[in-house]
Amino acid sequence: MLSTLRNTGVLARAASAGQRRFLSIHEYQSMNLLNAYGIPTPKSIAAKSPQEAFDVAKNFGRDRLVIKAQVLAGGRGKGKFDTGLQGGVQMVDSPQQAKEYAGKMIGSKLITKQTGAGGRICNAVMLAERREPAHEYYVAVLNDRTTQGVVLVTSAQGGMNIEEVAAKDPSAIITTPINFEKGLSKAEALEVAKKLGFSNEDTQSQAANIFINLYKIFKEKDATQIEINPMALAKDGEVLCMDAKFGFDDNAEFRQKDVFALRDISQEEPSEVEAQKANLNFIKLDGSIGCLVNGAGLAMATMDVLALHGGNPANFLDVGGGATPETVKKAFEILLADPKVKSIFINIFGGIMRCDYIAEGVIKATRELGLSIPLVVRLKGTKEEEAKQMIKESGLKIIAFDELDDAAERAVQLAA
């Protein structure tokens, strides 16, 4: 169940993807959303330039602040900027220091364990007041496959990797099912607060109210997960959400316009953004074999067969059942934009999708884009014979196969 918290595996992404991954928003946007539901957080303000960071710090009302790079990736504190600055989270004690750090962060790429070697651009920073925690907790609201419902996941061991906590001490994780319609009652929320070790009625009530309101956000905003790590009991007795990560269901975009207006495409892989515009289900990988397949299951199986023969796919690409020749051409453009791609493997099973449509798109793309890398094609199913005839009559150098194993093996050889 806890693996749901960070759904970053390639196959998990591919299996759950619609047109793109679940929407994530920046920390400062998450803080604003929490505050809108009456959930207390440290005071925080975003800045998009060094001068703006200076002005924010100057007018903040206190000197001791923390500045955080706004990048959609975990591990920011231990990350490193391509400018050489170590750490995407820094303590500042003056407006000038805030300006200097912002100048080193904004416009630079932060490299963390989640971004890969290329890093991710930082376009904004968040300045927040420093609040000293007496104790840190972990809180999450998410969908749980085991109970087939929503659960509140909490732990008194916050501020650290929750998967590691669960592995070392499963009893440290408290899982509370939530009635989808009724939500979390005050009595249920208070019981969780007591289990976490909040010792008096005031802090128990504060924590309970946070749990209740987190579920309200989850339901009303069509969230897929909310993760607070840490929620802290400050030394002054106030219970605060110190950090927040949200995920939202792409299928709810039509009724969550305000949330989806927060999307920052600069934090996404450009090829994935381009694919989404063409209704292509695309995820960029690090291999050298471009893949074009119909159906997520067949696409993943194709990737497995390529790996079995010693190859590495350059992408996951499902053109779906409604692809047109124009869609196929666009898919080719996206594949060819990746300089790592040394061969292309097309694997189509024609059920709803007609093989002759794919063949028409392949021929059109090959001619118009001046394809120079090897192209291996396997077409089976609806209009299969017509498609094979079209490819044969095209006179183009397209290598056709009937068997998946043979086709995959050849695609791997050609990419070597």
Image: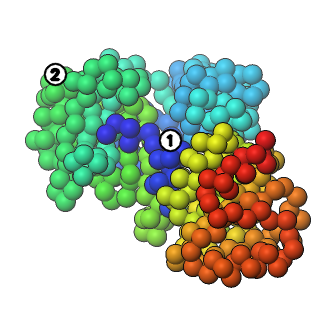
Q: Residue furthest left?
A: 187
- Mark 1 packing: few (<14 Cα in 10 Å), some, or many (20+)? few
Identity of the amino acid at label 2? Answer: Ser
Q: Is residue 51 left or right of residue 47?
A: right
- Which quarter shows the C terminus? top right
Circle number at residue 199: 2
Against 271, residue 97 (above or below) is above
Identity of the amino acid at label 1? Answer: Gly
Could one spot residue 400 in this view of the protein?
yes
- Which quarter shows the N terminus? top left
Residue at 50 percent of width and 47 percent of height:
11
| Dot 1 and dot 2 residues touching (CB under 8 Å) | no
* Residue 5 picture location, percent across and down: 39, 40
Q: Is residue 182 left or right of residue 393?
A: left
Mark 1, residue position: 9
Against 125, residue 22 (above or below) is below
Q: Earlier in the sequence, mark 1 or mark 2?
A: 1
Against 83, residue 210 (above or below) is below
Residue at 71 percent of width and 75 percent of height:
388
Q: Quick one: 368 or 71, which is closer to the camera?
A: 368
Mark 1–mark 2 distance (CA, rounded to whole Å): 39 Å
Circle number at residue 263: none
Q: Quadrant of residue 348?
A: bottom right
